[in-house]
Image: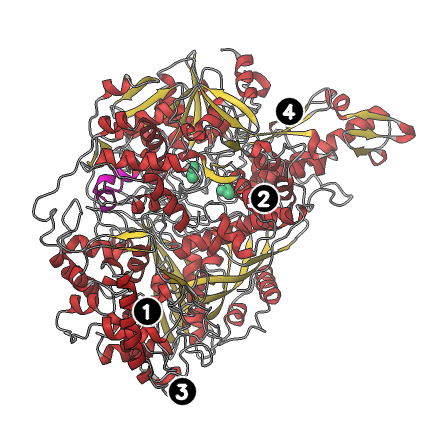
Amino acid sequence: MNGLTRRSLLAKSGLVVVFASSGAAGAQEPEESANLPGDLDKYPFLDSWIRIDPKGRITVFTGKAELGQGLRTALMQIAADELEVSPASIELIMADTGRTPDEGITAGSHSMQNSGMAILNAAANVRVLLTDAAAWRFASSVDQIELQDGMAYGPGGLRLGYGDLAAGFSLHVMAKPDVPRRSKGRRLIGENVPRVDIPAKVNGGSAYVQDIRAANMLHARVVRGPSDGTQLKPADIDAVAKMPGVEKVVQDGRFMAVLAAKEWHAVKALRRLQAAGWERRDTPLPSIDLCDVIRKSPARDIPIFGYPGPPAPADARIVKARYSRPCLMHGSIGPSCAVALWENGNLIVWTHSQGVSPLRKSLAEFVRLPLERVHCIHVEGSGCYGHNGADDVAADAALAARAVPGRPVRMQWMREQEHGWEPLGSAMVVELQGALGRDGRIAGWRHDVWSNAHNGRPINAGGLLAGAELEPPFAPQKPQPIPMPEGGGDRNANPIYALPNASGTHHFVERAPLRVSALRSLGAHMNVFAIESFMDEMAHAANADPVDFRLIHLQDSRAREVVEAAANRFGWKRRVKGRPGRGYGFGFARYKNLGAYCALAMEIMIEPDSGTIEVRRVVAAVDSGEAVSPDGIRNQIEGAIVQSLSWTQMEAVTFDASHRTSFDWSAYPIVRFPSVPVSIEVNVIDRPGEPFLGTGEAGQGPAAAALANAITDAIGHRLRDMPLTSERIRAALRS
Amino acid sequence: MISLTVNGAAQSVDADPDTPLLYVLRDELGLNGAKFGCGLGQCGACTVLVDDRPAFSCLLPIAALAGRKVRTIESLGTPDRPGALAAAFEAEQAAQCGYCIAGMIMRAQALLERNNRPTEAELRVSLAPNLCRCGTHMRILRAVRRAAAAMGGGVQESSR
Amino acid sequence: MAGLVLGLIAISVAAVVLAWKPALPPVPPVAAASFDRATVLHGETLARLGNCGTCHTAAGGRPFAGGKAVQTPFGAIFSTNITPDPATGLGRWSLEAFMRAMREGVSRDGSFLYPAFPYDHFRRTTDRDLAALYAFLMTRPPVSTQAAENRLAWPYGYRPLLAGWSFLYVRKEAVDETDRGRYLAEGLAHCGACHTPRDRWGAEVVDRAYDGAWVDGWYAPPLNARSPAIHPWTEEMLFAYLRTGLSPMHAAAAGPMAEVVRELSGVPEADVRALATYFAGLMADAPAATGGKTTTDKQSEADRMHPEGATLFAGACASCHEAGAPMMMQQGRPPLGWGTSLHVDAAHDTLHVIVQGFAPPVGRAGPAMPAFGNDFTDRQLAEIAAYLRARYTDLPPWPNLEQAVSDVRKEGGQ
Ligand code: FES
Ligand code: FES
């Protein structure tokens, strides 16, 4: 199959993906550079980011991926704004190992910081080059040049298109630092440009890797035991191979997949193989609470922070509390899927992995191909919220495709496979101790957090599920902590408050009973939950209003503004206290102390007999730096709040000695419409000229804490162990 | 060969009679709207209308469909000419990953065709079978309210 | 007909003699704070055991505010508001009035209550427990709402008749609190109200206790030696079932029983265990317990007999219920053939579950099944039921399946 047929294969599915050959458009190599903004620093050549063809068509490249967070539109907005064109005239190429810069993983709310800043500054550089070229062509000075909608205008009606101009110079030049942004104010940045990916999504268009449909394609299902640590008992494979429609049963070590031209035949064959039963080969899972296991396991102690200060005075009041969180699931609505094609010794994988480049490297080792023979192209999947099954299913697809060279293979995980095998967000324990001086100020602070790793993304074949199934197996990746200031289990353990005599330790527990990796916001959900719950406990001890208490410990002026904005918009001061069943809570954090600031206030009602929570009103304020798309930021924060309320209120992965028992939505319930808040209001504080800050993970911690604080306000008891279920509320009301 | 009526057109498909409608829509008829989410009737990603009522197409064998009308989101409009709900979802930017949205729209369509003046509580209860993991719920509700108004009705505040 | 007339006369005579009960004086509303906390909490447990909230809460309504219709053969009866609202609830009821209602079925104003309110069971509750229940109800948030008028066929709307009913039917034996399971089952938990057949006057037939009966269009199966269960109902199984809604050797609770289980999930383990012990004893001689039952899966035979049912099953049901399906493989859920509903004489329970499905309470984990009522025609539903019966039991086919489907459609409001 040549490039052309490949193109038509995908064009048929509506996904236009061009398989690049080599040369200028090929994969890009990073360079050394001099302190440029965002990932421009790694890839300083302008043509890594922006190209203009002789017809004036503009192509922008990013190594980051659209995950439903609106990144595609935001990046187009940035480039179009700076290049003085309409977003529609830009083609944006995302995360494709054959074409785009390697920007690592789309995670940690880094896309706007890294790729957005790179594209903004690359575009500013290109604008200068276009202006200079026009001035030279028109023999005029640069101030006489006006760029608009793809044309440069000069004195006396002279004009030339970008294509003509760009033909006269090379974009394969290093970006210059400190190129000023266009001076005439913003045109598109700060506007609510409608997301370009939404029309297909709301009209049944082709939008996802799941929607790829190619001629001659086979449907595949991987065959596994119910969860990590288990395997199927031997089944009658010959009988399954003879089932109607089954084209092939692929076996490689313990790896097994069924391939059929019709999807339903593959599903039926899978069921037949699964009926053989399964067993656990690994050591049994612990029978006691996972949080206790992690708390008591041998750990590597990593200091997180230490702020000097005099020891707390002897008469200071000591407050202590322990908080915990169970394992949580990503729980994508669409189980992971990938399409792979093995042809002439090359492997192409269409994947919704968040990291096409690390995946490519892992896959190359996994199928033992040289790196240049492996090509990974990002295509959207269902929302992933971190490291879910996307990478693993890509590896499964690759193995299946290798068995049928020349035929595209669509590998789709089943619901129970996603639930059973996806890496989880780690269970965590936080212990806090604070000293409260007689002046009502915090005089000492101690934070200890115990957690498994939050980073199991594949960097080699051992990081892929099927890596352990091959014979011989690849050695599993060794779990590693993520160093601060990003942090993993200790992300956001460092309080933003100005505290004297404060220290914290991350107790990194390497051995994880259940498979774990990155889940949206990593440790921040838990650390902010704990810190912000504890701030309320301290405020209570100090007999102070929770918001006032935060403010007296907060020096960062942007932080103060966000807290005040949320409180004022909510009407925090005017809230009527003491009505039965009603509670108010507040939560605040700056994500990683580097990203967006988010504060929110919440009003809830608790029904005392059942313990049911009704979240009546949430008001948030967020400062995400310069707001490229305020509505995009609101969308992300609203989503973060609802998702975090679900995590915090009702979610916990369950297991018994042999396997995970949370295998579907009945065993692992998440929020449904009747339980979402009555209203959520998000106020965006725009900071023109400030760097973009990612928003996707800013709301989870504050929402969790605000809920806990509101529950305490409503029932007079504090719940410190997630999930904050109605049963626990009921029990607390009866204790 | 099995005959089916999908979006007003008679189709005859080469599939086993026990095949769930979802796979036939996606793989045989090339329609993307209905999505595979669980195959267990728990998430609503696969929601379509059968005789004007919402159904989980993942659990609906085509053998059950003789003489019945199947409608998918593709029948409601296109990106160029979106239907009332799709237009409202665009206006409210009611999607993050969007994987759940086609199912949401079909369930809302069934509700509004029956009753374009539901209460807020009825609206929430009627969408309850459909899951969204991105937390787009508030926008989805806004979009349905907007569409209800555009369709000559509206969502009534419920007394809480 | 002659029996009916005679019966009516007997009841009327008794009614004339007994119909008069004095109104008990209203008392000033009692302050919630005057009840001690331990008593209130004990009362809450009792309210759950008695499943009070299920009948006295309308769909979407406030807890205990009444208004839910209870269907009886005589017409619809609407439950009353039992919150302490002074005007429309129990706010002005003394403990004495409350105890009289619970034991004699007489309202505070002297009028008789319909035996849909199972005071024939409640009367066996101790003074102490009734006082605790009173304390619990009087400390609920008051809700002001007037109960709807009952809709009863003539002559049942005539309340004095109830006095005669009460005289003739309410059992008077003493309370024995030492057998906790029996005390709860026969008293507050009123298990017989659903599981014991009633005569034409709506009274439980004493010598057929727990023989199985119809309630709300569902068949509540026998809980004695006639239990048709395929596996023995041991104390452990019953405990798991009553506590979690799922017995690993039987099936999930659905319909009215699901509500009972929901309430029991919030009462002390010892009480649930006591109930389990009691009923395990009653079912000790059932065929399953004495080795008289075996499971079966006659798939190929059933496929041949009911090809359409087989196809529908393969496309709709097998994704969860066939051996390699996730629910079976990962969760070890009981195979369909282990559920009692396939082994009773009426298909209604099986059909109810298919048509309506069931779900755990919002936000909680637990067995769930989607509703298939809209997906299938009546004939298709009948085909599926016939297939299940043929495949998983050795019993004769269900007669009149079409009728059963139409009953279930009606009752399910479909
Ligand atoms: S895919 Fe059909 S309900 Fe989930
Ligand atoms: S928008 Fe992603 S699941 Fe709903």
Q: Residue A73: percent from the left, percent from the top?
A: 62, 38
Amino acid type indicated by mark 1: Phe
Q: CA distance from mark 4 to mark 3?
A: 93 Å
The quarter of the picture showing ligand 1: top left
Tag 3 secondary structure: loop
Q: Which stretch is magenta?
A: C327-343
Residue at mark 3: chain = C
The residue tagged 4 is A172
Q: CA distance from mark 1 to mark 3?
A: 22 Å
The residue tagged 2 is B113
Q: Nearer the viewer, mark 1 or mark 4?
A: 1
Q: Is residue B59 left or right of residue A31?
A: left
Amino acid type indicated by mark 2: Glu
Q: Nearer the viewer, residue C114 or A221?
A: C114
Q: CA distance from mark 2 to mark 3?
A: 51 Å
Q: Residue furthest front?
A: C2
Q: Nearer the viewer, residue A373 or A584?
A: A584
Q: Nearer the viewer, mark 4 or mark 3?
A: 3
- Work out which quarter of the rendered image holds the N terminus of chain C and state it: bottom left
The residue tagged 3 is C26
Q: CA distance from mark 4 to mark 2?
A: 57 Å
